[in-house]
Each structure stands twice: as C-alpha cells, then as structure tokens.
Amino acid sequence: MPGQVAQMFEQALDPLKGWFHLSALDKSAKLSAVLLAAATTVPAGRVAVLDDNGEFTLDRTAITNAATAMPIFLWNGKDHPDVYNDGTSPTTDVVHWYAISPTGVMSGLVATGGYELQSTEYDTAQTYTPNQLLTADTDGVLSNQSAVQFTNWICGVCSWHVQADNQAAAPTGPEGTNAHGVGTLSFWTYFLPASP
Amino acid sequence: MSSPSSVQVLNEELFVQLETPGMEKNALDAVNEFTRVRVREDGFYRKIIPPVQVSNDDLDRQVDTDKPVIVVDKEPGSPAAISIPFATLPINVYIRGPRYRVMFDRIVTPRFVKDIDELRTWQMDIRQVLSDNAIKDMLAEEDSKFLTAVNTALVAADTIVPTSGVIQWETIFGGISRDTCQEALKIMPKTPSHLEVNTVLINNVTIREILKWGYDEAGGGISGDFLKSGWSEIDLMNVKWVITIKRDLVADDTMFFFGDPRFIGKSYLLEDTTMHIKREAFMIEFFAYETLGGSIGHTGGIARADFA
C-alpha cells in the first residue's frame, strides 16, 4: 500500500544453521481460515502450531492438545505474495479479484528439526540471556516470560546474536540488531511440552 | 506403449547419463520432454485458461518483497453516454481504472527415492509410471485450486454474486435435457458483461446424460453418432466441452461455464513442469515442480449450473 511500505526483512525468520537441505524438517499447511480472512497480521518469524484441522494457527490455547503442540517457526508471512493474494479492498470490502493461486499455504521450520534461528518476532521489552528458555504468546511472539522448564510450553533456547553490521558494537547476548538494522533474537529450536 | 526392450533401453540410457559426470542435465531433459506433453493433455485448468509463459522481464518489481508478482490492467468501467441539447458540454471523467495482481506459488511432487540396484529389477519403466502419477497429481492440484477460486467467486447456489449483481450459479430443475442445457447457457449472457459461453466443463459421468439424447433432442446424425461412437471432441451447442474424470472437483449433474479466457483472468507460467533428477552413490532421487500463478479478474466470465 503506498506510503506504508514494509521492507522484506522487517518481519522475518533467518535460519542461521541447519537449513537448507532437501531433508530439512519443514512443514507446510494452510493458514487457519479465521486468520486468513481476518485483518490479523501473521508475519514471518512467529511461532505457529497446527490446529485441530491441520492448519496453522498462532493461538495454541485454542486447540485440543495445547500443552504438547509442536512449535513451528513461520518462514512465510500471511502477506507474502507466495502465500496469499487477497483481492478484497480494505477500504470498501469489494472483491476485485479472486486468486487461483496462491491459496494461503504457509511453510515453517519444525522446532525439533535442529536449527539455530533468528527471528524479528520477539518481546523486545525483555532482556535475554544465553541458554534461557523461550516460549511464545498467543500471537506467536517469542518471549522469555513464563518460560519455566517442565511447567510452561517451551519452544527454544536463546543462543548468541550474530549477523550484526560490521561497524556495530559487539553483541552482548541473544538479542541484537542485524545488518538490516532490525532487532532480532537468536535461538536454537527446542521443544518441551508444558506440564499437563 | 513402450515394449519391454525399449523400456530397458530407456532405463539403461538413464543410468548411463546419470553415471557420466556432467550428463545429469541430459537425463533431466529426457524426462522433461515427456512430462510437459502430459501436462498439456491432462489438466482442464490449462484448457480453460491457457497459461502464458512469462520470463523475468514480465515480472513487476515490488518494494516490499522480492517474490514474483505481475500486475494486470483491467478494462475500466465507463459512464453511460447521454443525450444533450446543442451548446451543452459533456461532463468530465478523470481516467482511473482497476488492476489486479497475479502471484505465484510452486507445485511440487513428493521426492521419490530409490536404491538403483532395486530399480534394476523392475521390468516396467517404474520411473515413467511414478513421474506420470506425479504429474497427474500436479494437474489435480492446479485444477483443484482453479475450481476453488471459481466456486468462491460464484459465492453459492442461487445467490447473487456481488460483483455482477446477478445469480451466476443456478439450480436448474428438470434434469439434463436440451431445454435445460439452453437454460443453463443463458446464465452467463444474463450478466451485465453479456458474455457467451466458450467452454463447458463437465465430468465423465454427467456427459452420458447428453449421450442419452435421442433423435427428438439431438437430431438423427448426432444421436446416431452418440450411440455408435460415444462422446467425441466436438463443439456441441457452439461451445467447447471439456470432460474431466475428476468427479471430486466437478460433481455429477454439474456444469461449469467459462467465457473467452481473455474475459476471465490471467494464468502465467513462470517455470513449466521440471523434473529434478539426481544420483548420489547408489541412491537415485527425483521430483517435479512448477511455478504457476493465476487470478480471476472478472467474474462475468464464469458460471455454474447444478441440474436437479
């Protein structure tokens, strides 16, 4: 939309280690119809789970097996051109075209796949330290709050910031600004279900 | 059909190409040639909106993404002409018009993996069978996405389509007769776009309702041909008929109607069906993929009838 341009790296997931190869453990599924139709944003880098219909959703508390839901880190955002081509005008709700493709299918990296990732989608109000456990809120935003081992749903372990601009100060933890000037959190994917 | 000896030759040739450094491309080309022909023959989506091959030069660059997008201009609406007395000037219309986007995604088959020493024991061309099935799956995915978009655009049976203000998916009672077919063919011209039907999509079971037409409905020549030869590729009622076996997509007693492809939308092929094939030590792997994009830019070019 003119005047509201977001760059492609502002909300993104960067696989630092463990991807790409043809056997990489990724998962593709359609985004939940509720999220697809709504104005809700679903950016790349968020943590999704499969809902009871086998579709991606961000709010794991709304699904049957919330405590054991496998974390999946979204490679695509809902607004990516290879995910969804919405022909509905946000101004008038008039549908100007119907996309034959794409149809809302997204892709993500599964937390048990052995990756080190870097995401722009984390709670920037917190301070992160290496080897700290991470969870995600109902919008799929990473956080170290309420991330207690054997109690909460854990989806990652903080690593150490990389990919900083070569003129930037040395990183001081998992959080940092990447070479695009965007704040990111670096972590290893890890899955520990919440206690029943 | 390939003879066992020719199949063996094909397999041996494939092995030779794969075993020769730098010859993987040739093996890939050999398979590609075959698969592209199958795609053109089998998918009804490509028969209804033939995809246009595009290249990098055809893509429209976007600021917020590096993913391929093509922006298509659409014919603008124009205010009606009016009668005015002499010495009166026309009203002003500042020119604006709609556009729509075509975006792309990839259709990919599973990656087939096999130990080559197990492959040697097949007397049939297992590689060809698997690639045939894989291509059919890709075509089914194309067709499924296309009809999903069509059904979404048509909203629901006997419901007004917001973009045209008329019903474009009608339930027609009385079975499939000459009369009811003509009623169905009226749906599209009744829209504000006044388009005539160019193509009818019907499944292989429902077409037999038309083959039942006797002398009184089809005339002696056609009804005799139906009885003698069954359905053949003919233009009936001045429209092209595309028959599919995909009854999960095109239900029995249903017909989809499509206008000239230029009045429906765009289908672009960024990368046609390509077979990736690779041998690593004693393991062989292959999968097919394609990059295709399409949008329905005008709902006046589609309609549907459910016969009851």
Image (tube, rainbow, N blue to C red):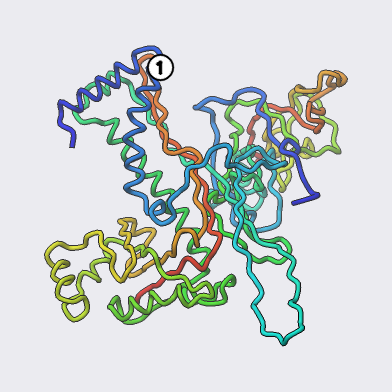
Tell me where residue B298 sits by quadrant.
Answer: bottom right
Image coords of residue A160 (percent x, y): 76, 22
Q: Residue at x 40, y 44 (%)?
A: B138
Helix, strand or loop at label 1? It is strand
Question: Measuring 49% from the left and 50% from the top, which residue is drawn there?
Answer: B267
**Left or right for A65, reference B42:** right
Q: Position of residue B59 (x, y in %)?
A: 60, 42
Q: Is residue A124 left or right of residue B57?
A: right
The answer to which quarter of the image holds residue B26 is: top left
Question: Split into 4 quadrants, where in the image is the C terminus of chain B?
Answer: bottom left
Residue situated in front as seen by the camera: A57 or B156 = B156
Badge count: 1
- As drawn, which residue projects farthest toward the top? B21
The residue positioned 59% from the left and 60% from the top of the image is: A97
Mark yes or no: residue A168 visible. Answer: yes
Question: Is residue A52 or residue B92 the one in the foreground?
Answer: B92
Q: Quadrant of residue A114?
A: top right
Quarter containing the N terminus of chain B: top left
Q: Is residue B87 above or below residue B292?
A: below
Q: Which residue is mark 1?
A: B280
Q: Position of residue B181 (x, y in %)?
A: 33, 76
Q: Amino acid at mark 1?
A: Glu
Q: Is residue A147 visible?
A: no
- Residue at 62% across / 39% down in the picture? B67
